[in-house]
Image (spheres, rainbow, N blue to C red):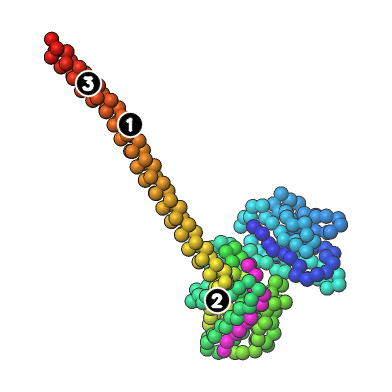
Amino acid sequence: MKLDCVYPKRAMIIQTSWVKSNLTHKENIAVVHPIYGIHIEDNYKGRIHFQNDSSEDNSLYFIKSTLEDVGLYFCSIQTYPDGIWEKVIQIVQPDAFEGPEKENNPVFTEPGGNVTFTCPYNIGGSVQQVMWERIKADRIDSIVLCNTLGEKSFGSDFEERTLVDCTPEASSTIILQNITASDFAMYRCVATGRNKTYAMSFTVAATLDHQWFIIYIAGGISAAFLLLVFLLIICITTAYHKKKKRKRITQALAKALYPTQTRVRSAGIYLYSVLYIS
């Protein structure tokens, strides 16, 4: 299991710390320092490791995760001159992980493009909050949270490339910019009211560039044509060799039979002549 923690900007990384938050207390996991190295707490030695040598990437890897690892994890990166940057990751039990229940709306885009999501909710009354999430097979990433005051709180990986208007009361729209391969996933809008909750899901999929699509089709047709020509050549060559082989066999049999018949007839004539002279 991997907990992603990559600083999105260019700055000097002073130190990175990982902390787990339980219901009653916080537990230190590890500290990564570019000069002094990596310090892992005794409870986590042999269970976690850091794979990337880059100072910007301090993602935490669990060698073997268990139910005891369920909880909130805080990745805190101290930088200069930007200050402290923090990311919160929640690990949930497998049976508690559920995908969206509402309709799934496909959205197609290319890497580097933008996608727009609109969530028209009608839950009868004021909306307390609207949460936008990205859902993958093993985790849920918070994109942005809008509250009743129109304030917004972004997830650490989305603040720089997400546009959202938190003021509308009947719908919510966000624009996710500069799509990357990791963004091809499922997205969910959850609007929470006093008595109702509305959820709507979307799926972002990659579109195939038309120019490359034509090249792929032309390449496939060319490959099929070459294969057909190759098979035709094999069939013609095989038939030619079989015909040539039959001809050689026929000629060999003819040569073997013709001298024998000639010798028999010659011997008969010679014998007849001898008897006639007598």
Question: For the residue labelled by badge 1, is the local secondary structure a helix, a strand or a loop?
Answer: helix
Q: Which residue is mark 2?
A: 107
Q: Does the image show residue 167?
A: yes
* Residue type, mark 3 in image: Ser
Q: Which residue is mark 3?
A: 266
Disc tally is 3
Q: Is residue 74 left or right of residue 167?
A: right
**Looking at this rendering, what residue extends furthest in the top direction?**
278
Indicate which disc residue 275 carries: none
Q: Earlier in the sequence, mark 2 or mark 1?
A: 2
Residue 11 pos. (x, y %): 83, 69
Q: Earlier in the sequence, mark 3 or mark 1?
A: 1
Q: Which residue is mark 1?
A: 252
Q: Residue at x 72, y 64 (%)?
A: 5
Q: Is residue 120 left or right of residue 155?
A: left
Residue 47 pos. (x, y %): 69, 52
Q: Which residues are magenta?
A: 170-182
Magenta span includes 176: yes
